Image (tube, rainbow, N blue to C red):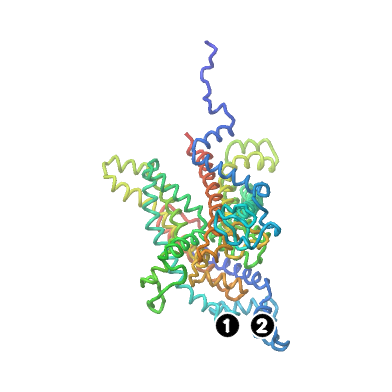
Amino acid sequence: MLVFVIRRSLQSVVVLVAMSVIVFVGVYAIGNPIDILINPQADQIDRERAIAALGLDRPLWEQYLTFLRGAVTGDLGRSFVHSTSALGLIVEKMPATLELAFSAMLIAIVLGIPLGLWAGLKPDALSGRTIMAGSILGFSLPTFWVGLMLIMVFSVMLGWLPSNGRGTTVDLFGVPLSLLTVDGLAHLALPAPNLALFNVALLIRLTRSGAREALLQDYVKFARAKGLSNRRVIGVHVLRNILIPVVTVIGLQFGALIAFAIVTESVFAWPGMGKLLIDSINLLDRPVIVAYLLVIVTLFIAINLAVDILYSALDPRVRLSEGGG
Amino acid sequence: MSATPPAAPPMRDAQSPFARLAGDFFANPVAAFGLGLLAAIVLLAIFAPLVSPQDPYDLAQIDVIDGRLPPGSRSSTGSRFWLGTDDQGRDMLSAIFYGLRISLAVGAASTVLALAIGLAAGLAAAYAGGRFESFVMRIVDIQLSFPAILIALILIAVLGQGTGKVIAALVTIQWAYYARTVRAAALVEKRREYVEAARCLALPPARIVFRHLLPNGLPPLIVVATVQVAAAIALEATLSFLGLGLPITEPSLGLLIANGYQYLLSGKYWISFFPGVALLATIVAINLVADQLRDVLNPRLQR
């Protein structure tokens, strides 16, 4: 187990370094930020002073080493546009994104698991078929377009809900949250379900197929043969066995939610990390792009590592291969 | 009548595998509907110049006076805009037909390229085994642990924008799915007796791989490829909507939707709504077909 954890952690570090090189080199090769950032009216001396101040005159590898040295100490460079710390900008926007992702995951769990269980128990009933048809729709609907349609119906036509921003926030331990105010909840009411949609469909399908498989297993037949109530058979024997893959997917999907929040945030002008990324790509604000990608890749690697380790702890049947793997 | 063969084979076995699969496929009316819808969409896309009321990108045929007309309006020359017009006075119906072309072409092109790469990598990994296999599969694992949209954004941020770059990003995302599917299927088949027999006959590896491993690995691959075409189309639309996908010279459905975004808030819904419906119909149709293919091609579900 320890060997596994060390091996996986080392692998994660290698992936992180490789990603940082790819991202850094790639991002620093597109466009020319000098043209965007420096006033075209500026004379030659001003230009050169600005280039030197931003460190853009040095060779690429030297810029990378400077960047790497900074990264280790938590300094991912300064935004060209905002002239503040790139990491600081991202950390500042992170609570908004996490709040959105948590709300979406909660919606997905509360809707997806019960509906999936129902569809798995009654695969041929009209209700089960309707749920499945709905889940195909949930998979197929492009998130960004659903977001537009939500705005069209609930903001433009009905005028019930706001279409952009976070609304009033309340600080909880210094972190601003929308969840705690009525106005904030109204602002969450469209983006959170929008982001949750794909995961509701995913959890429905996962729970349903798990339930259908579990129902055919000998231990379920045995439980029924013992005369246990339907409620107990499903609640204990079926549900517990399908929860292992479901919990794993929930863990992994949380990272995906943060990534997909890029789209939802852009549609609803939710002031999170994702919107910051899109704005930065459009402005060629390289330090912020690099910092965002590194932050999210780190987040992902951490989530994957945690899920892998948790999974092996949860399910005794999983034998982690400590050899080749 | 004593000549009756003792055990007449059931009809199913007498049919060709394709006819049997087709029969199973059309047994589900929803799937048949999906296939019909998909066929109609593909035909509309291919024959867009013939069926469109106007060429939406021929400046001589559009007039700014007709801009932002609601669905069903008449143009200044008397023809009807069934789905309304955009800000340039373009007929939305025609724009959607042309947009479908671009969306489908990008989806299909990236799928074919990714399929070729994934197939080669997966088969090579399964057949070669050893270090090469662990190397390829490790890349696949790492890549699949990141969501597609994130990889696409990293690549677009790195490569820059443009049609070729969008396709490159889609291929990079998809090849891993194929490689994993093909390898898994090929590994199962590799241990079967007929492959062993083929080896004993000293058949060249290429023949074993392409004549024996590949055909038997096809069913799961077809299902994955179908799902991935839909995923590629959706992802291209998302990237284009974010302004990071195709250039304005290639107005795919995603770009049409993005173009209508600013008019949505003033109640002019049709510029974004109808291209979205077309996108949705395409993705639903493909997913319905994929769903049924999965059931039909899955030997475990066969009675």
Q: Amino acid at mark 2?
A: Ile
Residue at 51% from the left image edge and 71% from the top image edge: A273
Q: Position of residue B302 (x, y in %)?
A: 49, 36
Q: Position of residue A59 (x, y in %)?
A: 70, 78
- Chain holding disc 1: A
Among the two numbered marks 2 and 1 on one chain, the one whose residue lies closer to the N terminus: 2
Q: Which residue is mark 1?
A: A83
Which quadrant would residue A229 be assigned to in this image?
top left
Is circle 2 on the same chain as circle 1?
Answer: yes
Q: Who is closer to the viewer here, B97 or B182?
A: B97
Residue at 62% from the left image edge and 40% from the top image edge: B215
Q: Nearer the viewer, mark 2 or mark 1?
A: 2
SS category of the residue bearing label 1: loop
Q: Position of residue A298 (x, y in %)?
A: 52, 69
- Chain holding disc 2: A
**Figure label count:** 2
Callout 1 crowding tier (Cα within 10 Å): few <14, some 14–19, many ≥20 = few
Q: Who is closer to the viewer here, B155 or A41?
A: A41
Q: Is residue A223 left or right of residue A51?
A: left
Q: Which residue is mark 2?
A: A38
Q: Amino acid at mark 1?
A: Ser
